[in-house]
Image: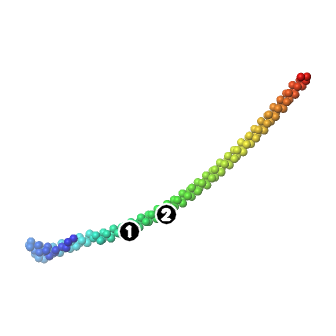
Amino acid sequence: MPALDTLGIAKRLKEAGLPEPAAEAVAGVIHDTQQLDRGRFPTKDDLTREIGLLRTELRAEIAELRTELRAEIAELRTELRAEIAELRTELRTAITGIRNEMALLESGIEARMTAMELRILRWVFGMIVAQAALVLTVLRMFPNH
């Protein structure tokens, strides 16, 4: 703001008919008011300094957030790896259980097949014996032929 010409203001007020003490008082009040207004508004340097401080604070907050995010991501990775390892263990246990069940079923099937083979062999042997007995009986019934 340009400097205020308080002497010029007082002179104009005197020329307008105001007594000299009143004219000087009014010019002083105007001068004081202008000085008060200047004190209320920041200068360009004040604004530049404040912007610089805000930038510094913002950069610090961004850096802090980055650090926090990296820590959270690392924690989540650790948790995820632990869960994956736990799932692998559970899957291995389930696969082992299934293999054991399959082995039991296979053993059961083999036992049944062995039992069936024995029953078939007995039946076949029984049939052979029955046929031999029948042939002998027929041969005894007709000894001459």
Q: Residue at x 65, y 48 (%)?
A: 98
Mark 2 belongs to which amino acid? Ala
Task: Give neighbour class at mark 2: few <14, some 14-19, many 20+ (Cα, 10 Å).
Answer: few
Q: Residue at x 37, y 67 (%)?
A: 55
Secondary structure type for disc 2: helix
Between 82 and 31, the one nearer to me in the picture: 82
Question: In the shown orientation, is residue 51 left or right of residue 80?
Answer: left
Q: CA distance from mark 1 to mark 2?
A: 23 Å
Answer above or below: position of 32 versus 74: below
Provide residue 34's location: percent of width, then percent of height.
21, 71
Mark 1 belongs to which amino acid? Thr
Figure quadrant of residue 123: top right
Q: Residue at x 87, y 25 (%)?
A: 138
Residue under numbered circle 1? 56
Provide residue 92's location: percent of width, then percent of height.
63, 53
Most distant residue in the front direction: 145
Secondary structure type for disc 1: helix
Q: Residue at x 58, y 56 (%)?
A: 85
Between 135 and 28, the one nearer to me in the picture: 135
Figure quadrant of residue 60: bottom left
Answer above or below: position of 115 versus 26: above
Most distant residue in the right direction: 144
Task: Give neighbour class at mark 1: few <14, some 14-19, many 20+ (Cα, 10 Å).
Answer: few
Most distant residue in the bottom direction: 21
Provide residue 99's location: percent of width, then percent of height.
66, 48
Residue under numbered circle 2? 71
Q: Quadrant of the N terminus?
A: bottom left
Between 145 and 117, the one nearer to me in the picture: 145
**One can see residue 29 in this view:** no
Provide residue 26's location: percent of width, then percent of height.
15, 73
Figure quadrant of residue 88: bottom right
